[in-house]
Amino acid sequence: MNARKKCVLVTATLAKDFGNTDAWVLGFRWYPIMTSRGGLAFHPEYANVLTRRTGPVSGQNVRTSSFMVGFVSEQKITVSPNENKKLEFVFKSRG
């Protein structure tokens, strides 16, 4: 008895839009406190991301969103070793 073995190559076909990503972000920055030496800013932001056909079980579209609120402070320090030369440093921090 002569048995032949067949080797079958299985390739998965994915949709053309698999993994496509649509993303948008909406945010603004408002400076309620601003002086010549520094300031404080209020920064809210909303983001929305849609990835096509990447659901873990069903293969459906997956939509995620996030909301962030932060405060940004800036401080300007001027160092003058002598009157002819001045160095300025700006420090920014996010909270």
Image: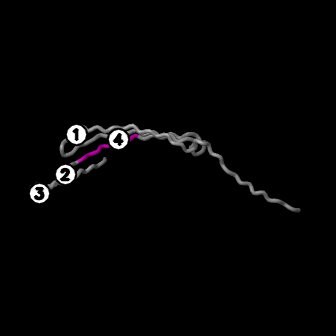
The three-letter code of the residue at mark 1 reads: Ile
According to the image, label 3 marks what residue?
82
**49 in magenta:** no
Q: Which circle's residue, 4 or 3, is located before the other in the chain?
A: 4
The three-letter code of the residue at mark 2 reads: Ile
Please report the bounds of the magenta region as a residue range.
67-74
According to the image, label 4 marks what residue?
69
Residue nearest the observer in this picture, 56 or 78: 78
Residue 19 appears in which quarter of the rendering?
Answer: top right
x then y, percent, for residue 37 = 18, 46
The three-letter code of the residue at mark 4 reads: Val
Asked whether the beta carbons under mark 3 and mark 2 sit within 8 Å of each other, the answer is no
x then y, percent, for residue 4 = 82, 59
Q: CA distance from mark 3 to mark 1?
A: 31 Å
Marker disc for residue 77: 2
Marker disc for residue 33: 1
Q: Which circle's residue, 3 or 1, is located before the other in the chain?
A: 1
Q: Residue at x 31, y 39 (%)?
A: 29
Q: Which SS class for mark 4?
A: strand
Residue nearest the observer in this picture, 77 or 63: 77
Q: CA distance from mark 2 to mark 1?
A: 17 Å
**73 in magenta:** yes
Q: CA distance from mark 4 to mark 3?
A: 42 Å
Q: Which SS class for mark 1?
A: strand
